[in-house]
Amino acid sequence: MTAATVAPGRQVGDGVRVTFPRVVHSEWVRFRSLRSSWVTLAITVLLLVGLAALSCWAREAHWPPRDPGEAASFNATLQAIGPGTFLAQLAVGVLGVLLVTGEYATGMVRATMAAVPRRVPVLLARGLVFASFMAAVLVPAVFVAFFVGQGLLASKNIDTTLHAPNALRVVFGAGLYLVAIGLLGMALGWVLRHTAGAITALFGLLFIVPLIIHFLPAPWPSNVTKWLPGGVGDSAGIAVWTPHPGTNSLGPWAGFGVLVLWAVVVFAVGAITLRRRDV
């Protein structure tokens, strides 16, 4: 990304005015040229599909379980996508962080912001490119994981289809959840500008804070956890890819809305700090 190609409102050598769509195009070129983007994306897809196969194979090999209650609570959809989604959120969140903090680490952010003096268009364009591409890859990947898992469970006739109650919402919601977690990681990267700090903040928000709240006296755990962005338990984002959210959880799409709101608020803080602080 150079000043000659992305400065909004200016003209490049051929007289073409640079607009926000051209900033988006520059961010797309940047995204696809980074090896870390493709490596992390490959790891994420491998986690989704590979763990679906492993989890469903293990369940199929040991069916029926000895505990009747375990058999009664079994859900074929969650068996296929649950383990992969849980771990993939870590990879996607880290990728979101690195797409911002990596530029600060190398100092290239100075050239980027010199090219786009208003700065905020860079933040918006990078988020748009990241969200669009990750949705285009991860949503289909979760569906692949679902079908791979069901193919293995079919040998014991414990598989399901997308027509089953809540199945389509769970599979589609898992893909959207991963995209939103990645955006939350990116937003934290803009706010903190430091790789280790942003990753620590993301993991703390997803896993450590819910754990701490769990040890608070009632009714704090149930009243607070459902407003946290995601990670584990009954937190807001989890509801969209949970077949039957708990009684203390928000509704699936209301919970997803809370997760998106978290990302939007942190992005807004990142935009403010980006405009006010030196790069």
Image (cartoon, helix red, strand yellow):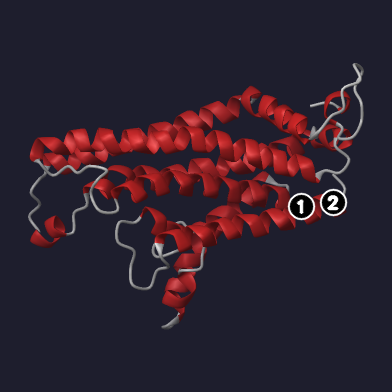
Whole-percent x, y for residue 12 in the image: 90, 22
- Is residue 101 something that shows in the picture? no
Whole-percent x, y for residue 28 in the image: 66, 28
Q: Is residue 62 left or right of residue 271?
A: left
Is residue 128 depicted above or below 74 in this figure?
above
Whole-percent x, y for residue 206 in the image: 50, 58
Whole-percent x, y for residue 216 in the image: 45, 79
Q: Amino acid at mark 1?
A: Ala
Which residue is at 36% across, 50% downward?
169
SS at mark 1 in the image: helix
SS at mark 2 in the image: helix
* Relative depth, front residue between 240 and 183: 240
Numbered circle sitting on residue 168: none
Which residue is at 32% across, 44% downward?
81
Q: Which residue is mark 1?
A: 271
Mark 1 → mark 2, Cα distance in angstroms? 6 Å
Is residue 16 depicted above or below 161 in this figure?
above
* Relative depth, front residue between 92 and 139: 139
Q: Amino acid at mark 2?
A: Arg
Which residue is at 84% across, 29% downward?
18
Tell me, yes or no, whether the two marked residues, 1 and 2, touch with CB atoms within 8 Å: yes
Numbered circle sitting on residue 275: 2
Q: Is residue 149 left or right of residue 65?
A: right
Label 2 Cα crowd, 10 Å radius (few <14 / some 14-19 / many 20+): few
Q: Is residue 101 left or right of residue 77?
A: right
